[in-house]
Structure formats: structure tokens, C-alpha cells
Amino acid sequence: MSTLNIPDLLPMKFIIITCLMALLVLLVLSGWAFAFYGCFFDAGKRYNVDPYLLVSIAKVESNFNPQAVNINRNGSVDYGIMQINSYWLYYYRIPMEWIKNPCYNIHFGAMVLRRCMDANGNNLSLAIDCYNRGSKANGESQYVLKVYRSYKKIKHMVR
């Protein structure tokens, strides 16, 4: 009869911890976020932006709701999971059915964020604020803090 010793149990402990961490990530990225997980990573790779930052922006913008529509005070409208502003639809002549596609919406949001990063020398505070407020960005808005908090939580959970 053989007995198990502590070193024999370490791989099992690692597997259990890994499974629990994966479950936690699934819970955090549940619902819509998990459904579009691949889109965030594909868009991040394509536009050279942190996919977890894209997830954080989607969390703050729409709480991962791909059908979210919000009318702004200036009359413009924000659409989808990344809350793409109607200005961009007009500027790029994008059909509404495209922007309603959640993966396209995420990719478009990544492109907007990349433009903001390029325009602001990769300063993340300014780029995140630019994503939300365009040319009015100064990097000190409450929006930036919300995105940073969301990012910190998400990164902590996937470590």
C-alpha cells in the first residue's frame, strides 16, 4: 500500500487553483463579455492595444451590452458594446448594421482608441479620455478613473 506525500499533491493543487482562477475569469467576463472574449483579443492584436483595456472600456461604456444605445446632450448617439459615437459612422460612412455587429463594434472601438493613443503620444490617460470626450480630453476625467479601476480589477482576476 502506497501513501501519498506532499510533493505528489502539489500538481493536483496547481490544477485545482488553475481551474478556480479560470472559473473566476469566466464569472468576471460572464455573459456578453465572455461571448465576445475572442473579439477583444483579436482587436487588441490588430490595433496594438491591450485587450484588457478594451474589456475595461466596454465594461464602463455599456456594461458589455451589445445593444446599448445612448443619446448624448449634443444630439449624437452612442451604439453598442463600445458605445461608438454616431460622429464616426458619419465620418467613415459606416452602415448601421455593421456597427450593430458586436465584434465589428469592438474592432472599431479598438481603432478609435489606437487613434487616440497615436494622437496623444501613447499617454494612456489622455488616450482613454480622448476615447470618451474626443478633442476635449485632458486625461483627468472621472471616466479615466472608472476605466482604470475596471482595468485593475480585471487584471487582478486574470493574474
Image: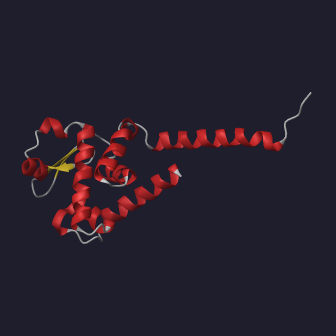
Q: Is residue 120 left or right of residue 13?
A: left
Q: Camera-side residue: 53 or 72?
A: 53
Question: Could you tell me residue 153's position as x and y percent?
Answer: 47, 55
* Residue for point 79% across, 39% down: 8
* Residue for point 39% across, 61% down: 148
Q: Is residue 74 left or right of residue 114?
A: left
Give the residue furthest to the right: 1
Give the residue furthest to the top: 1
Q: Is residue 132 visible?
A: no
Residue 96 to residue 136: above or below: above
* Residue for point 47% across, 54% down: 155
Question: Could you tell me residue 56's position as x and y percent?
Answer: 37, 53
Q: Quadrant of residue 120?
A: bottom left
Q: Camera-side residue: 132 or 159?
A: 159
Which color mode does the image show?
secondary structure
Q: Quadrant of residue 33?
A: top left
Q: Quadrant of residue 53?
A: bottom left
Q: Is residue 52 visible?
A: yes
Q: Camera-side residue: 45 or 95?
A: 45
Q: Is residue 7 left or right of residue 62?
A: right
* Residue for point 37% across, 50% down: 51
Question: Could you tell me residue 41's position as x and y percent?
Answer: 37, 45
